[in-house]
Image (cartoon, rainbow, N blue to C red):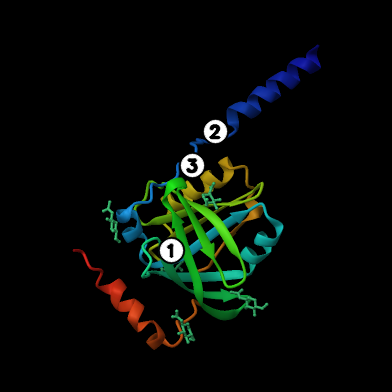
Amino acid sequence: MALACVAIILGLAHLLTAKPLDCEPLVPETIDNATMTKLLGKWFYIAGASQHPATLKQLELIKNAYYFMYPSNHQDTFLVTEVMRVNDKCVVDNSSYISVIRDNFTMILHGENESSVAQLIKSSFEDTMTLYHIDGTHKGLSISVRAQNMSTEQLEEFKTQVACLGLKEEETFYTTAKDLCPMEEEGNDKKHSVEVVEPSLG
Ligand SMILES: *[C@@H]1O[C@H](CO)[C@@H](O)[C@H](O)[C@H]1NC(C)=O
Ligand SMILES: *[C@@H]1O[C@H](CO)[C@@H](O)[C@H](O)[C@H]1NC(C)=O
Ligand SMILES: *[C@@H]1O[C@H](CO)[C@@H](O)[C@H](O)[C@H]1NC(C)=O
Ligand SMILES: *[C@@H]1O[C@H](CO)[C@@H](O)[C@H](O)[C@H]1NC(C)=O
Ligand SMILES: *[C@@H]1O[C@H](CO)[C@@H](O)[C@H](O)[C@H]1NC(C)=O
């Protein structure tokens, strides 16, 4: 009897001290022309979380990364140039593109070797790109921001979303702003850059 009481009190004490998680469902962002325009330009990849063992291995290797989203001739396709430090080597990949399926808020990332599906998630912050990655039954979340460093508020939002998805801290990898790779052969992207620097605003 006494032991049961102690157990109940300890149990309650635990509940009272545990920090409540303020979970809100992830809401996909409507992808319209304005959203498409807002996504253009340079982004810094900051962190990624995944339940998929293979993806987790890849995330662990990425020390840092930034990328550029360019408009293409096709309305719902972005061209992407990624500059990554992977395994202490610099990798520039301009072979990827993203196709957008507006009906179901989906972005399909077509990489050189593989494709992945993600949904753009609403964020409280303008300069945040949160992607919810769907890979069979495995979930994942990644965040990119406009600045090299993420603010504490952006970090808190991301951490909460990760925890609410049921992803563990050890399934999350953060990049470091140190030793960003230079973008090679800028000349190759002249045509793209001009479009980004001077978007036609009608
Ligand atoms: C969105 O942009 C495309 C061209 O990029 C245009 O054809 C279409 O009419 C625009 N849609 C709206 C709703 O403005
Ligand atoms: C990608 O980079 C290669 C080599 O740097 C270049 O030859 C090619 O034209 C670039 N492709 C695009 C789509 O920018
Ligand atoms: C959205 O539709 C595309 C094409 O039909 C499909 O490949 C993709 O898996 C869908 N996304 C989601 C989240 O259901
Ligand atoms: C794609 O696969 C090839 C061959 O395995 C590899 O050399 C290349 O680095 C891969 N590309 C990316 C972007 O991972
Ligand atoms: C990013 O944050 C780190 C650690 O707080 C700091 O050392 C670094 O200078 C910051 N970089 C930028 C570009 O703000």
- Looking at the rendered image, the quarter that the C terminus falls into is bottom left
Q: Position of residue 155 (x, y in %)?
A: 47, 52
Q: Position of residue 128 (x, y in %)?
A: 40, 55
Counting every numbered tag in the picture gives 3
Relative side of 76 to 162, left or right: left
Question: Which residue in the protein does label 2 denote?
Answer: 20
User: Quick check: can you spot residue 144?
Assistant: yes
Relative side of 55 to 129, left or right: right
Answer few, some or many: residues within 10 Å of disc 2's Cα (few below 14, many 20 plus, some between 14 and 19). Answer: few
Question: Which residue in the protein does label 1 denote?
Answer: 149
Q: Is mark 1 within 8 Å of ligand 5?
A: yes
Q: Nearer the viewer, mark 3 or mark 1?
A: 3
Q: Amino acid at mark 2?
A: Pro
Q: Which element type, helix, strand or loop, lies under badge 2?
A: loop
Identify the residue shown where x is 35% and y is 58%.
36
Question: Which residue in the protein does label 3 denote?
Answer: 26
Identify the residue shown where x is 57% and y is 70%.
63
Quadrant position of residue 186: bottom left
Q: Quick check: marks 3 and 1 in contact, CB under 8 Å?
A: no
Nearer-N-terminus badge (3/1) = 3
Answer few, some or many: residues within 10 Å of disc 1's Cα (few below 14, many 20 plus, some between 14 and 19). Answer: some
Q: Which element type, helix, strand or loop, lies under badge 3?
A: loop
Relative side of 197 to 202, left or right: right
Q: Is mark 2 within 8 Å of ligand 5?
A: no
